[in-house]
Amino acid sequence: MITLAVLTLVALATGFFDAIAGGGGLIIVLLGGHVLCVTGLAMGAGQFAGSRLGARAVIGGGARLVRPMIVVTSRLMATRLLMSPGNPARAWIMNALSGVFGG
């Protein structure tokens, strides 16, 4: 049976290994001299601020906020993938739409 203690231990282990992997990657990139420090710090600050705002929104709004966001995000991602130029179904969809709209 999975208990809260087991889930906590798994989460801690996952965070530890994620930090090790990220730190190892950073060291390799630093040794290669391919780091844009200002850009990286700006991205880190944006990720921190976005995480804080997102966590507060979820705590305040709960499922009323999260469910519609998941639906909208999923639909936008599916539309983007479906309409990408490399997708073979795109031509079929565009032909179908041009027949419907007379284009």
Image (cartoon, rainbow, N blue to C red):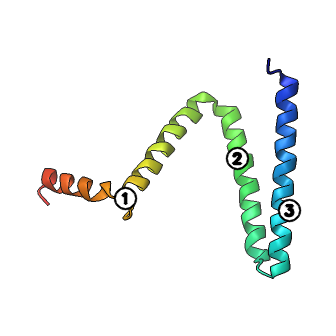
The numbered disc on residue 87 is: 1
| Residue under the image location 87 percent in, 48 percent down | 16
Asked if residue 87 lies left or right of residue 26, the reply is left
- Residue 75: % across, % down: 44, 44
Please tell me how crowded label 2 is: few (under 14), some (14-19), or many (20+) other residues with Cα within 10 Å. few
| Residue under the image location 20 percent in, 53 percent down | 97
Work out whether 38 lies above or below 63.
below
**SS at circle 1:** loop
Task: State which tag comes first along the sequence, 1 or 3.
Answer: 3
The type of residue carrying mark 3 is: Gly
Give the labeled residue for mark 2: 53
Q: CA distance from mark 1 to mark 3?
A: 36 Å
Give the labeled residue for mark 3: 23
Question: Quadrant location of the C terminus?
Answer: bottom left
- Residue 14: % across, % down: 82, 43
The type of residue carrying mark 1 is: Asn
